Image (tube, helix red, strand yellow):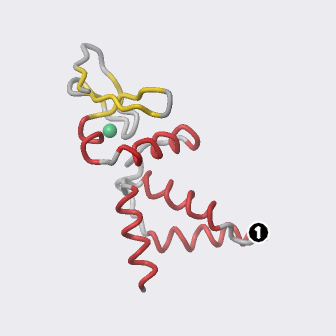
Amino acid sequence: MIVNTSQTVICRICCSTIKKNAKIFKEGLRFAIVYSKCHDNIPKDDLELMANMFIAYGGYFGKLKNSNFSLYSTLKELIIEFNLDSKSVPVDELNIKMKYRALLHGVTPQEFINGLEILLEE
Ligand SMILES: [Zn+2]
């Protein structure tokens, strides 16, 4: 659904200011307004996951886009953080934290999965 608003709206995913062509997607039982670029380029399930992560942890898609991001370095950093707490590395938590950091750097969930596959092949 395309909505043209007379007021300025902020995209739920990337925090861009939307003046026209805002799109609405259903997010669980709620609706969220997103910029058409995000709506058209990111699968609906991923939009929902991203919106939920930003609600839970803060930030937005591409917030740290101008800084360097390496999946391998992030993985190493997180394992070191877990080891500092003398915890064994919980794979689910590691996966969520890696995905969240990737999103902040403007890496889409699909690009994240592709990056993981490349990392695992090495
Ligand atoms: Zn957006």
What amino acid type should be assigned to the residue bearing mark 1? Lys
Q: Residue furthest bottom?
A: 122
Q: Is residue 37 above or below residue 87?
A: above
- Mark 1 residue's CB less than 8 Å from ligand 1: no
Residue 70 falls in which quadrant of the image?
bottom left
Question: In the image, is 2 to the left or to the right of 28?
Answer: left
Determine whether the residue tagged by mark 1 lies in a helix, strand or loop.
loop
Residue holding disc 1: 87
On the rendered image, what quadrant is the N terminus found in?
top left
| Residue 39 x, y percent position in the rendering | 29, 39
Quadrant containing the C terminus is bottom left
Residue at image point 69% right, 67% down? 82
Q: Position of residue 7 (x, y in %)?
A: 29, 15
Residue nearest the viewer, comparing 19 with 29: 29
At x 65%, y 72%, the residue is: 80
**x 38%, y 77%: residue:** 118
How dense is the environment of label 1, judged by Cα within 10 Å: few (below 14), some, or many (20 and up)?
A: few
In the displayed structure image, the side of residue 59 where residue 85 appears, left or right:
right
Picture coordinates of residue 78, whole percent (x, y): 60, 67
* Residue at point 56%, 57% (across, down): 96
- Above-or-below relation of 63 to 112: above
